[in-house]
Every structure is written in C-alpha cells, then in structure tokens.
Amino acid sequence: MDRSKNFQKNFWWNIIGTGFNSFNSLFLMVIVTRLNGMNEAGVFTLAFSTACILYVIGSYSGRVYQVTESNKSISDKDYLTSRLIAMAVMLIAVFFFVGARGYGFEKAIVFILLAVFKALEAFSDVLYGVLQKEDLLYKVGQSYFLKSCLTLGVFLAVDIKTKNMTLAICAVLLVWVLCILFYDLPASLPYVKNSPAPLWKNIWFLFKDGFFVFAILFMGIYMTNASKYAIDNFLGDEKQTIFGILIMPATAVCLFGQFIFHPYLGRISELNAEGDYKKLYQLIRKVILMIMGIGVVCVLGAFFLGIPVLNFIYGLDISPYKGDLLLIIVAATLYNMGGTFSNMLTTMRITKTQFVMYLVFVAIAWTSANILTYRFDIHGAVAAYGFLMVVFVILYAVVSRVIISRKIAKKL
C-alpha cells in the first residue's frame, strides 16, 4: 500500500493502540488501590516503575533506533536475536535488584512478575519494529488494543475473584503469551522469514552501536522515577500510592506526545537521510508546538477537574495536592518537548552528546529527589520532578539548536 494512503490508518490505530496500552498502568493502579489497599498499591506502583526501567534493558536501544537504522546489512533476525539476549539480561537484573533492596518474598515476587510482563512487551516491540518498517504501524496499534483490553479484563476478573494481586499479574502474563503466539508472530514472521540469517558480528554491532541510545533511555526512565525511589527510601508505601496517583495523569500527557511524534518518525528519518536539516528542524518545531498546545489543555483540565476526578476514581481525598498535580502536568509537557528533541538527535545518531547530558540529568534527579523528598515529603518529590524537567527541556533546546545550525551551515 502507498505510504501516503497508509498514513491515516497508521495514525489512528497508533493513537488507539498506544493510548489503551499507556493507560493500562493507570487502570491497573485504580484496580489495585480499590481492591487490594494502599500498601499493595504502593508496592505495585514502585514495581511497575522498576519494570519500566528494566524494560529499557530488554528493549535495548529501542524501536526508534530499529526503525531508523540505515545499515542495510542488519537483518530483522539480527534484531530479534539481539532482543532475546537483552531480555535474558533484563530478567537476571531484576533478581539482583530485589536482592540488593532486601525486599521480602511477597514484594519481590511482584517486582519479578512485572519484569516478566515488560520482557514480553520488549519481545513484542522488536516485532512491532519489523511491522513499522513495512509501513504497517496500524497492526501494531491493533495488537496493543487487543492486549490492553484483555489485560484489564483478565486482571480485574481475577483480582475480584481472588483479591490476590500476584495471581492477577500471572493471569495477565498468560494473556500476553497467547497474544504474541497468535497475533504478533503471525503478523511479523512473514517479513522476518525473508531476511538473512542472524550474524554474530551484526548482533555485536547492534549492542555496541546502540549502547549510547540504550544508556540514554535507561537514564531517562530512571530520572523520571527518581522521586519514587526517594519516597521508597524515606516515606513508605502509602505515600508512594499518593505520589503514584498524582503522577498518573502525566502518563496521559506523555501519551499525547507519542500520538503526535510516532506517525512523523518515518518523515523525520527521510529528512535526516536527505540531509535537509532545515526542514527537519521545522518539522520538530511543529511537533513541539502541538505538544505545547495539548499541554495547555491538560493543565486547564487538571485545574478544573483533576482533583475531583482522581478522588472519585481512587476513592481517596488528595485535595491538598492540587498544586502538586498542576506542577506535574506542566513538567510532563516539558519532558515531552525535550523528548522530541532527543528523538530527533537519536535519529541523527548524535548519542554521545546526549549521553553526557543524561549523566547531568541523573545527577540532578538523584540529588534533588533525595534532598527535597527528605525535607518536604511528597511536595519535595514533586518539586524535584518539576525542577528536573525545566533543566531537561532548556538544555535540549539549546543543544539541538546549536547542532542543527552547524549542520545547516555545513550544507551551505
């Protein structure tokens, strides 16, 4: 099918599928809070965030790298093999993590099961990369939609029946295995089968060349969750639940950013390959303006409806945290804007510079989160998150402008 004809289909199914998938964590959090209580909800929140960090190991360098890679000697089977290796490392890492933190068995098993859940998502993601390169992003959206609906339905049914969060997670894992076997693999394998056999030199190249992309993603997920670990250190599971509720709307803001950016990824890659950096930067600015517009709408929605809606959904009173909620929405918008610059630079394979930038971000995140959370409770954790995102978007805007200007100057 012609790429222009496929754009609308890809765009809308990407919105539907990615939207349902991204909201899964929010709805699961609601279910756990309502059915299992504040303490278990706090454990679930931190475990899910940790699984997202470990997911970066399992997905190594990510789908953006896979879809925009211009080295034609790297086959789909190379990507698939490297992903299986990365998933194994991810699952080993979660055992080291729970051991290092000294968690009890019940808490540790939740961390491990959610890591397995994200490992399955990492496996699906490499198959999605195959489909996206074939301009079949709509099939990715359909897969996400199917899995999301089944995940929520099965988790809710099992948790209502058993009041056991661990059994509900196990049931979800079975759902994902079945979806991969009967949807993801049949959709993508015809294209994988036509690719050359995997070569160890290519697999090694992917790990070596993708290291900085992986490190950037890993540090990026950590820095957005630094406040949660500070809360785990100083405040406990109940406060973790409150912070988790406040941060959940940020998921929607980041989700809208994905809606806008992903359909343009192919065009961004094309402009980079053509060396048309002026048009590339114009497109990035257009995306960022759209993100800003959505951010303004989200802030207004949070101001008028945020607290009442969250109180109703979770059955808790978080009215004292209205200012914190608004700051989180603003910060999430800034993160989306900075992330758009980051994706542009990743497409241009400018990763070493970003690696240094993220070292700075992680240092700021760890320091500010621990100091401010210790001194000002949840308000401090939110303030640390907001401060970090201000630094994040300013530094990315400046560095991106300098790099693009130099690229344009060289073309003249």
Image: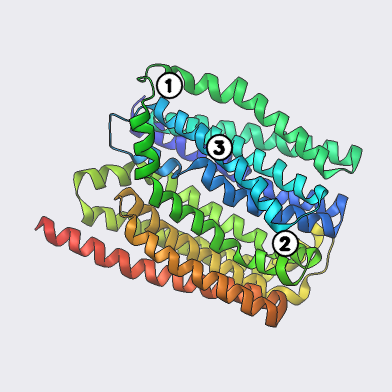
The number of numbered discs placed on residues in the rendered structure image is 3
Mark 3 vs 2, N-terminal side: 3
Real-space Cα separation, disc 3 to disc 2, in angstroms: 29 Å
**Residue identified by numbered label 2:** 245
Real-space Cα separation, disc 2 to disc 1, in angstroms: 41 Å
Q: Residue at x 33, y 57 (%)?
A: 352
Secondary structure beneath dot 3 equals helix
The label on residue 87 is 3
Mark 3 vs 1, N-terminal side: 3
Q: Residues within 10 Å of mark 1 (few under 14, many from 20)?
A: many
Q: Is 62 or 315 nearer to us in this picture?
A: 62
Q: Quadrant of residue 145?
A: top right
Give amino acid for label 1: Val
The label on residue 192 is 1
User: In what quadrant of the picture does the C terminus appear?
Assistant: bottom left
Q: Residues within 10 Å of mark 2 (few under 14, many from 20)?
A: many
Q: Is residue 148 visible?
A: yes
> Which mark is in front, 3 or 1?
3
Residue 384, percent from left and from top: 58, 74
Real-space Cα separation, disc 3 to disc 1, in angstroms: 19 Å
User: In what quadrant of the picture does the N terminus appear?
Assistant: top left
Give amino acid for label 2: Ile
Mark 2 vs 1, N-terminal side: 1
